[in-house]
Image (cartoon, coloured by chain):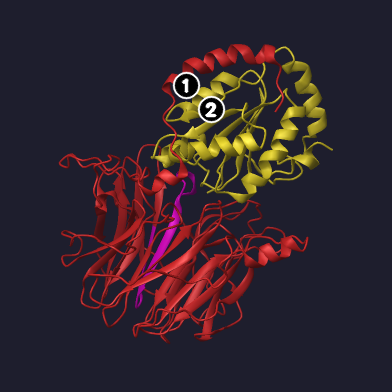
Amino acid sequence: MRPKEPMNKPSPFGFDQKYHLSVFSILLLMVSSLLPSNSLAANSRDFVQGSYAHIIETHKNHSFFVSLWSIDCPPCREELPEMEAYFSRHQEISLILISTDGKDLAAEVEQVLQRNGLADAESWIFAEDFVERLRYEVDSTWHGELPRSYFYSPGQPRQKISGRINFKQGDD
Amino acid sequence: MTYSLKRLLPLVLLLVFMCTSCATETKLDQALSAAPALHNHKKPSEAVACNSAKALPALRCGQAPSATFDNKGRLWVAWTFGGHVYVNHSDDEGINFSPPVAVNSSPEMISARGENRAKIKVDGKGRVHVSWTKPLKKRFTGDIRYSRSDDGGRSFINPVTVNDNRDPIGHRFDSLGVSNEGRVYIAWLDKRDRESAEQGGASYSGAALYYSYAEPGADTFAANIKIADHSCECCRIALDIDPDSLPVLMWRHVYGDNIRDHALVRFITPNKPATPIRVSHEQWQIDACPHHGPALSISEDARYHAVWFNDAKHKQGLFYAYSEDRGQSYSPTVNFGDYNKTAAHPYVMAVEDRVYLSWKEFDGKETQILVQQSKDGGKSWGLPKVMSSTSNASDHPLLIKNYSQVFLSWQTANEGYHVIAIEEEPIQ
């Protein structure tokens, strides 16, 4: 019944507490300064079967943070501006946003991203109705709760976080 | 987010190329006239795809159907299509259906996705009751709507709004129950107290559980009653009628610091709720939308059967428990389903000593609906059995009953709407 990967509480940053983010960030900054910047997108790309593997492959050489969210999820909406502020200060970590809303709500998704200063962030939107398959490709133990986040760092197992992350605290 | 232009430029060029393949965006308002995107039910034999502008309202294209049997064995289904709730019925347990009838004559936005759906119940006199949530312009806002047919589903009264607070705030996630004599009970998640608190500068976690009722045959609902502050704000509410013809509600609550466990309340009279009681104790602490509400079924002997999902660190997945003292205390929980196959959206139906559980799993290729049975009131359980499967999008599975026969009610993109009789496991 238990997932194989560690599930961490969303405090202070959702990462395993044995990691201290500030130390982590300094190390990452040193490494990632040699790597390409976050990839940017003016509009959300279609998130379809295989997209998640593509994202992982694209970013595998540096640290990145994946946030699955929805315009219909109040904690996600509260998290967006804090995320924008945090990742503006930590460009060594790529931010990838994946909206689970579906293409019919793409315009509203773009508006919300724009309002929160995230129009230029790498953004994807669920573009297949078979959402079970899309979710499974992300994580077979994710049951759809939002926000759902993953932190990837080369050579480390990914860390999964369910629920809103306190980005302000994570920056202290 | 601030990025340097130098870094941005190559990506802008890339995006110009990529956006040639970007799909056309659809405005929210267009959803009123558009065919539903979630369920594109196109059977090989049917020429018009559900997402075509030419698609007509049909159950196979309906979003998020609910179903119930009346006391004559007629199956009734309510579903959403293009700004209307439609109702049709079947006299052969879902093989053939009557032409659909629109419940709301004027189109309006209707929540019909995931945890939201139009609800339908039929009382002992054959009156057909329907409720739904009408989203307003601003996200997270809505009104609770109700309509009824007194002529066997041929026509419906103009919908009424149940929430007596008419501010454009959250009144959503309706749940409907109807007693045999026709008293209508509706519960929902309400943000009026949260709004008041926030206007006063205070914080307020989640929403509140509100409730109202209408006397048999009446179109007006009683003054709204608050059941509890601090419900979770994005999960369906379970509602069943106990042998006293009063409703019992179960919902995901926010206990303390974002611990999202479940609570239950029964009623002493239609306008007097008893004290809510905590049902689950997995201690799932999360500031998130679980999108996973509970289900509840009350057997003829007043045993309450409850199912829910939680994802606490050491207690994960689907859970079942029963109460023999009308919700005061509960059996030890039974953990069911395969967590690693995303076991989700449990439902329960009790018929005397028989109890049926259903839920959804996904194995990487197909979605399966599993059913597990107990024949001793939930004390012991048979093995899970696959009842249906699909390799495309699908709705949550629901259980309904026609007297003692239990059915799975399920909408899938490939197969359309279907009801499947669940064969009783033999008593050994």
* Residue A5 at least partly seen: no
- The residue sitting at 66% across, 55% down in the picture is B285
> In the drawing, what numbered circle is on residue B194?
none
Three-letter amino acid code at the position of disc 1: Cys
For residue A43, the mark is: 2
* Residue B278 locus on image (x, y percent): 61, 71
Residue B351 among magenta residues: yes
Amino acid at dot 2: Asn
Q: Distance between the residues labelled 1 and 2?
A: 8 Å
Circle 2 Cα neighbour tier, 10 Å, few/some/many (<14 / 14–19 / ≥20):
many
Q: Where is residue B292 in the image (x, y as percent from the top left)?
A: 51, 56
Task: Out of B77 and B362, give the one closest to the viewer.
Answer: B77
| Rendered-image quadrant of the C terminus of chain B | bottom left
Q: Quadrant of residue A69?
A: top right
Residue drawn at the location 54% of the way across and 20% of the way down: A57
Q: Name the residue under label 1.
A: B19
Tell me which corner region of the image, top left, top right, bottom left or bottom right, holds residue B350.
Answer: bottom left
Which chain is in yellow here?
A
Q: What stretch is highlighted in magenta?
A: B337-358
Q: Residue B283's quadrant in the figure?
A: bottom right
**Label 2 near label 1: C-beta < 8 Å?**
yes
State left or right for residue B394 relative to residue B262. left
Provide the chain ID for the residue under circle 1: B
Label 1 residue SS? helix
Position above or below: B291 against B105: above
B319 sits to left or right of B400:
right
Q: Relative to residue B330, is residue A35 drawn left or right?
A: right
